Image (tube, rainbow, N blue to C red):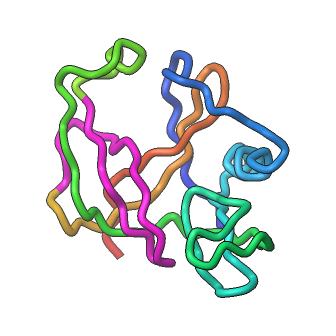
Amino acid sequence: MSLQTVVLPGRRGIPPRVNTFTARFWTALEEGRLESTRCRACAHLGFPPRRICIACGAQDPEWVELSGAGVLYSSTVIHAGPSLYWAGGPYTVGIIDLAEGPRLVTRVLGSLPPPIGSRMQIVVTRHDDGCLFAAIPAAAP
């Protein structure tokens, strides 16, 4: 599945730390896919991707693609944020329950925060120096 891309001019506030393990996640995101890891031992699917399962401690993850579809669990509007992010402030941060189970925290794009319980979609945000991800309200089915 290919995620929608939203272009946000400028540099990312804090570029991600990419290492040999997380490189797959960032490459997939650049290609329009959201991936994470599922434990082969207990099938726990989490986010962010982890080498060691937080449910059972096994160290045998497999990479799986996520749809990016979810529901807004909670949100807040940041009115006085860190200077690295303030160029885009005020801004909304939300907790999204993904359809596959994991819960993630991300920026929610748009001028007003959507109501709790809204259907959401993760999108790739393309910046001058690379990609991140954010959420937008999902289109009606």
Name the quadrant containing residue 64: bottom right
Q: Nearer the viewer, residue 37 or 51?
A: 51
Quadrant housing the C terminus: bottom left
Q: Residue at 38% of width from left, 21% of height from top?
A: 85
Q: Nearer the viewer, residue 8 or 100?
A: 100
The residue segment tinted magenta is 91-114
Name the quadrant containing residue 69: bottom left
Q: Nearer the viewer, residue 42 or 46?
A: 42
Q: Picture coordinates of residue 98 (x, y %)?
A: 44, 70
Q: Picture coordinates of residue 1 (x, y %)?
A: 65, 67
Question: Is residue 88 shown left or right of residue 115?
Answer: right
Q: Residue at 59% of width from left, 80% of height from top?
A: 44
Q: Residue at 79% of width from left, 45% of height from top?
A: 23
Eyeballing the image, is 90 above or below 3?
Answer: above
Question: Is residue 43 shown left or right of residue 85?
Answer: right
Q: Is 42 a magenta residue?
A: no
Question: Is residue 1 shown left or right of residue 74?
Answer: right
Q: Nearer the viewer, residue 35 or 118?
A: 35
Q: Picture coordinates of residue 103 (x, y %)?
A: 42, 65
Q: Is 111 a magenta residue?
A: yes
Number of numbered discs: 0
Q: Residue furthest right?
A: 20
Q: Picture coordinates of residue 39 (x, y %)?
A: 69, 77
Q: Residue furthest bottom?
A: 42
Question: Is residue 75 shown left or right of residue 137?
Answer: left
Q: Residue at 73% of width from left, 49% of height from top?
A: 31
Eyeballing the image, is 49 above or below 65?
Answer: above
